[in-house]
């Protein structure tokens, strides 16, 4: 279970471990593709505005069993100004569906949230509301907080970090569903291998973005929040139902039992 690592992000460690060793080295010829900094700017822009995005996610997320999830992310309003996991004047909505009847809804505006969940062991919907700080259950929002979690990882990849020295590769490809995608890959190798210029490196993570800045896919070969995620649908206007709790909300938080 990765809940502890998720809590560390919310408490201020800020980034997934999977990206903590990246630097800003380039791996493509000048002018062949956008720079890593441009890819980061595209992802940051994707945090703003109105949209609904539906993802298929694989991996063992915290709280509920995997390995396959369907996650609907909806957003209304401006981008977060300083804290990607706090909405400020915008509203986020996340609806997670796992197998065997496990479901979790999380709606937040600023530092206030409403959440609902159900599972076979506790039938029916259980809903509550509250405000959150870094350590009081905020990790439940981050476990499928796809746009902000990806952006935080890209920030470390592009802006650099301690440790090994992977290279960043930017490519572009066509998607039959979402048009042109811009992808950033980190290619990992031992420092000695990098110095020799060897080509037997393995991709550590690849993130692709749509022209609008939405995360189209992410593939990870190291430890991460998820193993893979894939965008299967998006629309520019989220329905109002995305931001309404699915059942009556009580006055106190109703977080799922861990």
Image (cartoon, grey):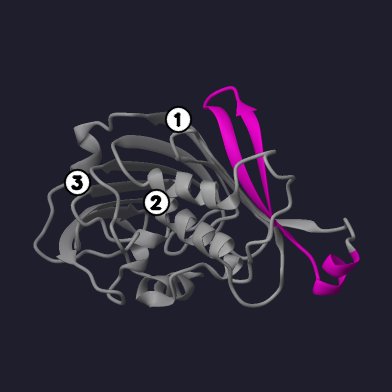
Q: Is residue 244 magenta?
A: no
Is 53 situated above or below 137? above
Residue in the foreground of this view, choosing between 66 and 83 = 83
State the residue position of label 3.
245
In the rendering, which numbered label is found on residue 41? none
Residue interval drawn in magenta? 168-196
Name the residue located 67 percent from the left edge and 40 percent from the top edge.
Answer: 31
State the residue position of label 2.
102
Query: Main structural element of the magenta stretch: helix, strand or loop?
Result: strand
Name the residue located 39 percent from the left edge and 51 percent from the top edge.
Answer: 102
Give the mark toward the camera: 2 or 1.
1
Name the residue located 46 percent from the left edge and 48 percent from the top edge.
Answer: 41
Give the mark toward the camera: 3 or 1.
1
Alpha-carbon span between mark 3 and mark 1: 22 Å
Is 76 situated above or below 111? above
Residue in the foreground of this view, choosing between 200 and 3 = 200
Ranked by sequence position, the earlier of labels 3 and 1 is 1
Ranked by sequence position, the earlier of labels 2 and 1 is 2
- Residue 113: x and y in percent read 20, 58
Is 96 situated above or below 166? above
Res. 34 image quadrant: top right
Q: Residues within 10 Å of mark 1 (few under 14, many from 20)?
A: some
State the residue position of label 1.
233
Q: Is residue 182 magenta?
A: yes
Q: Residue furthest top?
A: 176
Q: Quadrant of the C terminus?
A: bottom left
């Amino acid at each position: 279970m990765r809940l502890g690592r998720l809590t560390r992000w919310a408490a201020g460690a800020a980034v997934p471990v999977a990206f903590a060793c990246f630097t800003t080295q380039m791996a493509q010829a000048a002018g062949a593709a956008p720079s890593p900094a441009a890819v980061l700017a595209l992802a940051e822009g994707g945090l703003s505005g109105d949209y609904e995005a539906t993802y298929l996610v694989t991996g063992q997320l915290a709280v509920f069993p995997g390995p396959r999830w369907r996650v609907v992310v909806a957003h209304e309003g401006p981008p977060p100004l300083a804290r990607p996991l706090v909405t400020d004047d915008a509203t986020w909505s996340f609806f997670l569906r796992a197998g065997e009847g496990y479901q979790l809804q999380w709606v937040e505006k600023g530092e206030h949230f409403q959440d609902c969940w159900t599972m076979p062991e506790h039938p029916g919907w259980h809903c509550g509301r509250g405000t959150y700080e870094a350590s009081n259950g905020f990790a439940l929002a981050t476990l499928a907080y796809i746009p902000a979690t990806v952006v935080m990882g890209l920030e470390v990849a592009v802006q650099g970090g301690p440790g090994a020295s992977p290279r960043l590769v930017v490519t572009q490809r066509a998607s039959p569903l979402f048009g042109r995608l811009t992808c950033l890959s980190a290619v990992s190798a031992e420092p000695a291998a990098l110095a020799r210029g060897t080509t037997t490196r393995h991709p550590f993570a690849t993130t692709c973005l749509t022209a609008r800045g939405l995360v189209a896919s992410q593939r990870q070969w190291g430890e991460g929040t998820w193993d893979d995620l894939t965008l299967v649908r998006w629309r520019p206007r989220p329905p109002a139902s995305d931001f309404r709790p699915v059942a009556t909300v009580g006055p106190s938080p109703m977080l799922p039992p861990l």
